[in-house]
Structure formats: structure tokens, C-alpha cells
Image (tube, helix red, strand yellow):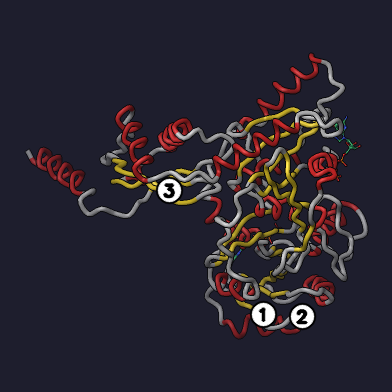
Amino acid sequence: MKPTVVLVGRPNVGKSTLFNRLTKTRDALVADLPGLTRDRHYGHGKSGSKPFLVVDTGGFEPLAKDGILHEMARQTEQAIAEADVVIFVVDGRQGITAHDKDIANKLRRLDRPVFVAVNKTEGMDKGVTTADFHELGLGEPWSISASHGEGVRGLVEMALEPYPEPAEDEEKERHPRVAIVGRPNVGKSTLINALIGEERVIAFDMPGTTRDSIFVDFERNGRKYTLIDTAGLRRKGKVFEAIEKFSVVKTLQSIEDANVVVLVLDAQADISDQDAHIAGFIVESGRALVVAINKWDGLSSYERDQIKNRLLSKLKFLDFARFHTISALKGQGLGDLLHSIDSAYGAAMIKMSTPQLTRVLIDAVAKQAPPRHGLFRPKPRYAHQGGSNPPIVVVHGNALDHISDSYRRYLERTYRDAFKLQGTPLRIQFNVTRNPYADEVPKRRLEGKRSTFKK
Ligand SMILES: Nc1nc2c(ncn2[C@@H]2O[C@H](COP(=O)(O)OP(=O)(O)OP(=O)(O)O)[C@@H](O)[C@H]2O)c(=O)[nH]1
Ligand SMILES: Nc1nc2c(ncn2[C@@H]2O[C@H](COP(=O)(O)OP(=O)(O)OP(=O)(O)O)[C@@H](O)[C@H]2O)c(=O)[nH]1
């Protein structure tokens, strides 16, 4: 399971700047889709080959008893309770403040590692800037500059040192690992119970993790599935006991652990921001997806039509997935749902050979060549598969950094149709290593133009 790094600190010390720096590599991979809601407080980072989750907290007011500040503090406490590592950001230019000391008092009582990041120290003497902050009693302070990227990599490497490199377990299992996610009260537990019912075979703690992530195997119609039971992902802290029933971190972790995610929506309630945020997390993760519109029982056909239209228009960015209407309570629609889980899993794990991918590419280019960009004419030549879950198609050729977004989408659609990839996102990457000959043509053309000016 991915470790979770939580950023805390008083306002204006640079938490958002640090968050952006930690998460930006992953961000670049995900296209902005119309309607997609991004939650800027949760993100994915990578340190070497180790992936991690980052949570930015709004602010920390340990003394506020009510109002918005209290609410923010409550959310921060929740995030800290779920943290594996806390990074406490302070302002190296301003020096230590009373507020910093309050936060430190609280953090010192935590039963997990806390790193003090002394920010905004670019161009300053490291020894001098950090000296002050030893007083916080949280170990050796780290001097960083979030905006210049100084010291950040080392800090994160240090913070994640106890966590193992991710295991290559892709090939081991031949059946889908499924996460059932959704906001509170949509019917997740009811669905889980309907699926595993009496067939609850084994529940075990995954070895090597500090948390109890519960994986439950079950069989339906002769097919095996492993369900990630998010209720098992709850953990108590010594200081911050109050863990909410719904947790974004828990949701993110179960999405990451899954091959296929079932997003459960409540047909009898409107789509909320929370639904849209969860949907956004799934798209960013690249996991395969099946949407289950639950509580379909007891609705008139007029209501059903209305709901379907509304959902489809609000969740357009999920159009790569199949939508199912179900009733978890009455056990209706579950067979079809499982069927879509199987096919989404198959699509996510597909193996596409280089000749197959290249043939599709060449046909696509013959039908519609990428538009010229200024002096550059992008020329895709061949493609290979760069990964699974989500499938990644890596396209090679010349001047591919000049391919437009709409042409990328054209290729995506073409590959999706050719390989019948329903239920999984598909990523197209362009290999942009420079070919020395690729620049030759534009250069000569430039010279040609210059000579006409001379006349
Ligand atoms: N000089 C310098 N300025 C920085 C650095 N990191 C952040 N800042 C600036 O500090 C200010 C606050 O940064 P934010 O990232 O918004 O701080 P925050 O802690 O998220 O603030 P809140 O959202 O209020 O909690 C901005 O003006 C940043 O440009 C840094 O490494 N060096
Ligand atoms: N009418 C109807 N009610 C349902 C259906 N599925 C669940 N419910 C009801 O919705 C309520 C919430 O169901 P839960 O399964 O506890 O929902 P949950 O998503 O697990 O909720 P949290 O544990 O709060 O995250 C319960 O009262 C269920 O009986 C359904 O298909 N139809």
C-alpha cells in the first residue's frame, strides 16, 4: 500500500507550493477532461520508484474551538491520523512563531515520524536558518526551498526510507482485484455483502504493511475476484482518535490497490461534489472502472430516464466506462455488473504486440496525418506497449513533441476501437527523444527563405 505523506503547518509557509512540487510529475500524465473535478488537496507523488500519496492540509489551528478554523483543524487531524509520515512546514525567513510551537506540541505526541521542513531558505545559510527550529523538539530540521525545488528530494527520500520499493506483482494474479468506492450512504456495504454473501472465504491481513488492509476472495459463476474491504483500512492513532467513517485517504489507497474500481452512485440522490471528486481520483489513478448506479428499485420509469440523462451528462468524462443500474438491496443487476468488471479487467491487462500496435498506427496516420506545427511535421513511425492497468501505448517517430492534443485523442479513439478497450483509461505517450535528422528539413527551409530575403 502506498505510504501517505501529510503536509501541515500554519498558513502561508509554503505548503501548497511544496504540494505542487511533489505532485506535478503525475499531473502531467492526466489530460484535463471537461467536467472532471480535481481535488487539489490530495495528490500522487513519486520518489525514485516509490509512489506515495500527498495530503495538503488547509491549516492547523490547534486552539480553535468552533467555526471554520475548528472545521479545518478537524480535517487536519483526520489527515494526520491517517498519515504514515508528517512533514511539518515552517517559514525559515520568518523564524519560529508561537503558532509553530503550538503545532509542534501536538505533533510531538504523535506515534509516527514527523519531519520539520524549514522552507524559503534559498540563498540562505542552511545552518543559520535551521538552528532556531531545533527548539521544536522534533529532530533535525531540514532546510528546503519549495519554490526552487532545493532539498525537497532528499527530504522525501529520507521520509520514505522505511518503505519498501513497490513489488512487481502484476503477473501473479489472474483475477481482478476490485475496490468498491463511493461517498457515504450510497450502498457500498450493502453491495459488498450482496456480492460476497455466504461465500466470504478468507479475510487476511496483508503481510508487510503496517495497516490491516483486508482482501476478501469470493467466487461467482466460476470466476474468482478479490475484494478490497475498505472498512479494514481504518487505523487508530494515539492522539487523533477521531477517524471519520468516510476517508479520502482510505478511498485513494483502495483505488491504488485495485485493478478495477466500482464507483457506486445513489440514484435517489443528486450527484454531489464528493461523487465528482471521487470520480476524479479514479480517472487520475488510471484504474479500470465500472459505474454502479445503486438504489434503482422503487423508481418510476420517468424518474429513471431523468436520472440517466443527468448522470450521463455530468459524468461525461467517465465515458470510457460502462454504467449499470443495480439494486444492492434486492440483489438486482449484480451478474451484469460482474460481467463488466471482468471485461474491464481484461481491457486493463491486455497485451498488445509491437506489430499490432504499429499496424494500427500506420493505418491511422494514412487516414489522417498529424497536422504540421510551424516548421515541424510530426511523423509517427511505430508503437509499443509501455504498461498495463492502464494500458500505455508509446508512439515513436519524429517531432512527436509537436503533436496536438486533439490528434492524441484521435489516436486514443482509434486504439480503443481497434482493441475494444472498454472500461479502462488508455494513455498515449509520445517518445520525444531527438532524432538528429528530424531537425534538418526545417533548417534547410529556413536557409532557403533567408536567401529569398537577400534579393
Ligand atoms: N522565497 C520563497 N517563497 C516561497 C517558497 N515556497 C512558497 N513561497 C511563497 O510563500 C507564499 C505562501 O505559499 P503557499 O504555498 O501558498 O503557502 P501555504 O502554506 O499553502 O498557505 P495556505 O494556503 O495559506 O495554508 C507564496 O507567496 C509562495 O510563493 C520558497 O521556497 N521560497
Ligand atoms: N432502496 C435501496 N436502498 C439501499 C440500496 N442499497 C443500500 N440501500 C440503503 O442505503 C443505506 C446505506 O447503505 P450502506 O450499504 O450502509 O451504504 P455505504 O455506502 O456502505 O455507507 P457508509 O458505510 O456510510 O459509507 C442503507 O439504509 C441501505 O439499506 C438499494 O439498492 N436500494
The residue located at (43%, 37%) in the rendering is 408
Amino acid under disc 1: Pro
- The secondary structure type at the circle numbered 1 is loop
Give the mark, 1 or 3, whose residue is nearer the N terminus: 1
Q: Nearer the viewer, residue 315 or 350?
A: 350
The residue located at (69%, 71%) in the rendering is 90
Q: Which residue is mark 1?
A: 141
Q: Disc 3 to disc 2, how far (Cα)?
A: 50 Å
Give the mark, 2 or 1, whose residue is nearer the N terminus: 2
Q: Residues within 10 Å of mark 2 (few under 14, many from 20)?
A: some
The residue located at (81%, 57%) in the rendering is 232
Question: For the residue with label 2, is its CB less than 8 Å from the closest atom of ligand 1?
Answer: no
Image height check: is 157 above or below 227? below
Which of the two marks, 3 or 2, is nearer to us in this view? 3
Q: Are marks 3 and 2 in contact (CB under 8 Å)?
A: no
Q: Disc 1 to disc 3, how far (Cα)?
A: 44 Å
Q: Position of residue 202 (x, y in %)?
A: 79, 56
Please indicate, yes or no, whether residue 346 appears anywhere in the rendered image.
Answer: yes
Image height check: is 389 above or below 318? below
Q: How many marks?
A: 3
Q: Are marks 2 and 1 in contact (CB under 8 Å)?
A: yes
- The secondary structure type at the circle numbered 3 is strand
The N terminus is located in which quarter?
bottom right
Q: Nearer the viewer, residue 181 or 192?
A: 192
Q: Which residue is mark 3?
A: 385
Amino acid under disc 2: Leu
Question: For the residue with label 3, is its CB less than 8 Å from the closest atom of ligand 2?
Answer: no
Give the mark, 3 or 2, whose residue is nearer the N terminus: 2
